[in-house]
Image (spheres, rainbow, N blue to C red):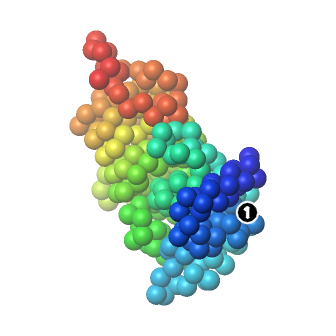
Amino acid sequence: MLNKIWETITGEAREAITQEPFLEGFLTMTIIKHASLCDSVSHYLCERLESDFLSRADLQAVFLEAIESSPEIRQAITDDLQAIRERDPASRGYLSPFLHYKGYHALESYRVAHWLWEKNRPHMALLLQSLISRKYAVDIHPGARIGKRMFIDHATGIVIGETAVVGDDVSMLHEVTLGGTGKATGDRHPKIGNGVLIGAGAKILGNISIGEGAKIGAGSVVLSDIPPHTTVVGIPARVVGTPRDNLPSLEMDQTLECEGFPAQ
């Protein structure tokens, strides 16, 4: 899959150059000159995250160390991109999300920060978190644990706390918070099950569990455990129905299934 996606991206880049010749320099430096998707991701993200106090070369050394040492990161670079392609109707191919989707950029950068955190390198991990937040308006603590095939749509305003755990195949939209309830210490952030869909602006607060296949309506505030395969909405959120799909994150259907009422 990795090689196939990379071949598709390079093909789309060459086609884009044919359509827009002035992009040749950018696409050559970003994609065509690189030997693999992982190399290209490392180059592109470090170019965007470099700062006055941390050069692109120094950042890239860290990124390459993490990517080369972690098969999980290498797999995620492909799987997260594939998740976008399958779930977002606006993604016409792989090139556009690879180049322009800041949710993808922030997520892959977080995965490097998490690797640093797990290697007991907190200062570098937290510096990278700060750079990601400043560049993408996405604030994911490097201690958070995020599973496979994650899709963060639009991404602006995402906050995920240190002890949050996010399962596989989760999708969330902009302005979602997985936060604490105040000054609690220790394990204080939400645990999100596989296949959960979290609507724009939802706030999930405290060390609570969101069951597998749940759907959280946009703008909801969730303060207590949510059973698997339920739809919740409101402030505070309450169960209003059952998602039509077993894993609503895959279908991205954000209409609400309210018991006794037709789908909204």
Question: Would you say residue 180 is visible in this rendering?
Answer: no
Q: Position of residue 221 (x, y in %)?
A: 29, 41
Most foreground residue, 37 or 8? 8
The structure residue drawn at horizontal position 59% and vertical position 63%, both measured from the top left corner, is: 17
Asked if 119 appears above or below 255 in the picture, the reply is below
Question: Would you say residue 34 is visible in this rendering?
Answer: yes
The structure residue drawn at horizontal position 48% and vertical position 87%, both measured from the top left corner, is: 53
The structure residue drawn at horizontal position 42% and vertical position 65%, both measured from the top left corner, is: 136
Asked if 57 appears above or below 36 in the picture, the reply is below
Q: Position of residue 19 (x, y in %)?
A: 55, 58
Most foreground residue, 16 or 119? 16
Q: Position of residue 120 (x, y in %)?
A: 62, 71
Q: Picture quarter containing residue 198?
A: top left
Position of 71 with respect to 196 (left or right) is: right
Most foreground residue, 108 or 34? 34
Identify the residue under disc 1: 36
Asked if 200 appears above or below 186 in the picture, the reply is above
In the image, farthest residue toward the top = 260
The structure residue drawn at horizontal position 59% and vertical position 69%, both measured from the top left corner, is: 24
In the image, farthest residue toward the bottom = 53
Position of 92 with respect to 263 (left or right) is: right
Most foreground residue, 6 or 130? 6
Label 1: how many Cα within 10 Å (few below 14, some 14–19, many 20+) = some
Disc 1, SS: loop
Q: Quadrant of the C terminus?
A: top left
Q: Picture quarter containing residue 215?
A: top left
